[in-house]
């Protein structure tokens, strides 16, 4: 059984089509990064998976159950947006409230420690800084120890340390029985964390595969050098070795030769820009 | 499981409100303050007046808690991101609603209890134990239509407007219903519409505990109001669902 199964999802808001036939499955052990530009449909996809919205067509199951059923929801941990918490509640109380809903939650203190909230446990949520509130939101997603964790832009607004802590939690939350799906604008984050990358653009899945295949498929290498004329030359090719060999045997003068892998970002921009 | 969740949500709502003095003090203390300032002088005249007035003010207390808890409270929360998070948790909507009802009952009991206590101590009320119990029961059951009126406000009026709208209906309702002065002393225009208002019928129900008022008629009218506002509240709830969660 897939932990997440989405089939033929379509969703429009008025005349704006947010998703147009999106389907994918996520299995235990996977960390899936959902990438896409603003407005590509990432948040809509997450909302459909969480059962917060209903698709116009298509279906979602979480652990084989419809997403709005208690059976599905007991297996899902999501993060709230960090604004609008019940201000007077203390950090620990809020995390405890979330934990009560799950059968096998993590120990509260462990989760607080994981997100560096131990010292703030007895502070009221309303008095925390924006970054601190974001860490509380993350703690709420993980505390239930669910089989499926879904995070919508979890690292936005986090400092470097908090981001590292988040990465650790994401890695720990995907094992033989569990998975994590997250959206992000940071490609290096997807590259560092994900076992699988899903790219959505204009409401359709443009790519679905490993970070490695993502790069291999779209990420040609580049050869750069300055020719004798002083002109800077950039060549993109799959066979950099062959190109350099030819360049050298041709006897042409050049200097400052570098061979680089296209960055993740280049690949991504090629992909969504080119429309594949 | 669901009971544990109910307890957790009641506790969270209670703590949040208890730590908000700006909510707590007016909600719990307002009716007693009004009682002392405006009513106590009359209540001390004789037992009948004292009885009539304590029944009014117990209703006044319940009315405030229900209208503000369900009107303003729900209106403010339905648009918050926190509400979205709660919806994604494995807890039934009914359980969270039950938690809110319980919290309203607790604050209602505190607010009305305080009025009853002050009345018992400072005025010549003659209610016996059975009558106090009947008064409590009437106050709780009679408040149901106002829970639904509150919800109708919450789902049809934008959050910013909920407080002024609720305040207006609350004070007008109390006045026309005969809570500040007995119905027979109301100005003639108010007397003319008074019998058709839910607050007046709520008053009739409460006053029937000690005097000769038609409880059955009051219950029938209140039930009609409850049905009407249940329909309006459900319509508003569905509209909210369609715009926010469809």
Image (tube, rainbow, N blue to C red):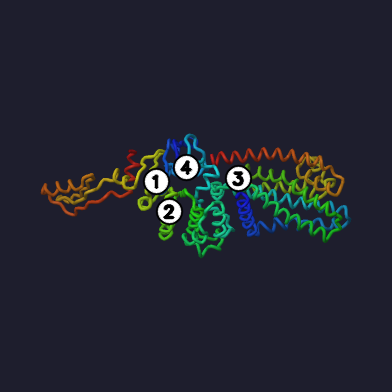
Q: Is B216 situated above or below A223?
A: above
**A271 left or right, relative to B47:** left
Q: Specify the farthest residue to the bottom.
A: A119
Camera-side mark, 2 or 1 = 2
Q: CA distance from mark 4 to mark 3?
A: 22 Å
Q: Label 3: state its secondary structure.
A: helix
Instruction: Give the residue displayed 42% in from the left and 55% down from the top.
Output: A172
Q: Which residue is mark 3?
A: B93
Camera-side mark, 4 or 2 = 2
What subunit carries mark 1?
A: A
Q: Label 2: state its secondary structure.
A: helix
Which numbered disc, 2 or 1, marks the residue that appears first in the sequence? 1
**B245 left or right, relative to A245:** right
**Residue B170 placed where, x, y %?**
72, 48
Q: Which residue is mark 2?
A: A170
Which numbered disc, 4 or 2, marks the residue that appears first in the sequence? 4
Q: How busy is the neighbourhood of tag 2: few (under 14 within 10 Å), some, or many (20 plus)?
A: many
**Residue A8 placed where, x, y %?**
44, 35
Q: CA distance from mark 3 to mark 2?
A: 30 Å
Q: CA distance from mark 1 to mark 4?
A: 13 Å
Q: How busy is the neighbourhood of tag 4: few (under 14 within 10 Å), some, or many (20 plus)?
A: many
Q: Label 4: state its secondary structure.
A: helix
**Residue A61 placed where, x, y %?**
48, 40
Please say if the residues under marks 3 and 2 sit with CB atoms less than 8 Å apart.
no
Residues at marks 1 and 4 on the same chain: yes
Q: Is B69 situated above or below A126?
A: above
Q: Which residue is mark 4?
A: A44
């Amino acid at each position: 059984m897939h932990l997440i199964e989405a089939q033929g999802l379509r969703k429009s808001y008025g005349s704006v089509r947010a998703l147009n036939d999106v389907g994918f499955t996520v299995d235990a052990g996977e960390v899936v990064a959902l990438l896409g530009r603003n407005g590509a449909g990432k948040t809509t996809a997450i909302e459909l998976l969480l059962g917060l919205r209903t698709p116009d067509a298509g279906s979602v199951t979480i652990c084989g159950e419809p997403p709005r059923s208690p059976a599905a929801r007991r297996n899902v941990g999501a993060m709230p947006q960090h604004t609008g918490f019940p201000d007077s509640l203390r950090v620990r109380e809020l995390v405890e409230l979330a934990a009560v809903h799950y059968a096998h939650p993590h120990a509260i203190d462990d989760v607080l420690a994981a997100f560096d909230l131990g010292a703030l446990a007895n502070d009221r949520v309303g008095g925390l800084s924006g970054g601190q509130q974001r860490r509380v939101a993350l703690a709420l997603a993980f505390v239930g120890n669910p089989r499926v964790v879904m995070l919508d832009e979890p690292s936005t607004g986090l400092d470097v340390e908090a981001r590292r802590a988040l990465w650790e939690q994401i890695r720990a939350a995907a094992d033989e029985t569990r998975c994590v799906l997250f959206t992000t604008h940071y490609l290096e984050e997807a590259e560092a964390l994900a076992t699988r990358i899903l790219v959505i653009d204009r409401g359709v899945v443009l790519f679905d595969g490993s970070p490695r295949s993502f790069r291999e498929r779209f990420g040609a290498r580049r050869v750069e050098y300055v020719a004798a004329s002083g002109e800077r030359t950039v060549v993109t090719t799959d066979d950099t070795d062959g190109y350099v060999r030819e360049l050298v045997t041709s006897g042409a003068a050049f200097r400052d030769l570098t061979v680089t892998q296209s960055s993740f970002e280049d690949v991504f921009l090629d992909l969504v820009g080119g429309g594949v | 499981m669901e009971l544990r969740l109910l307890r957790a949500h009641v506790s969270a709502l209670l703590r949040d409100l208890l730590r908000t003095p700006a909510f707590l003090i007016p909600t719990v203390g307002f009716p007693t303050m009004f009682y002392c300032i405006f009513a106590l002088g009359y209540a001390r005249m004789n037992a009948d007046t004292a009885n009539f007035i304590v029944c009014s003010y117990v209703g006044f207390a319940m009315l405030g808690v229900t209208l503000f808890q369900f009107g303003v409270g729900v209106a403010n929360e339905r648009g918050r991101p926190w509400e979205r998070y709660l919806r994604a948790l494995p807890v039934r909507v009914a359980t969270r609603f039950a938690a809110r009802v319980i919290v309203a009952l607790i604050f209602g009991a505190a607010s009305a209890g305080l009025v009853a206590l002050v009345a018992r101590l400072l005025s010549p009320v003659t209610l016996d134990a059975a009558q106090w119990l009947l008064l409590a029961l009437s106050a709780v059951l009679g408040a149901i239509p106002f829970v639904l009126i509150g919800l109708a406000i919450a789902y049809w009026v934008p959050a910013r407007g909920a407080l002024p709208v609720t305040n207006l209906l609350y004070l007008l309702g109390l006045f026309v219903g005969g809570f500040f002065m007995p119905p027979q002393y109301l100005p003639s225009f108010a007397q003319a519409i008074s019998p058709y208002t839910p607050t007046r019928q709520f008053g009739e129900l409460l006053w029937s505990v000690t005097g000769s008022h038609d409880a059955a008629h009051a219950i029938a009218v209140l039930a009609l109001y409850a049905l009407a506002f249940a329909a309006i509240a459900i319509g508003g709830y569905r509209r909210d669902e369609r715009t926010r969660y469809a």
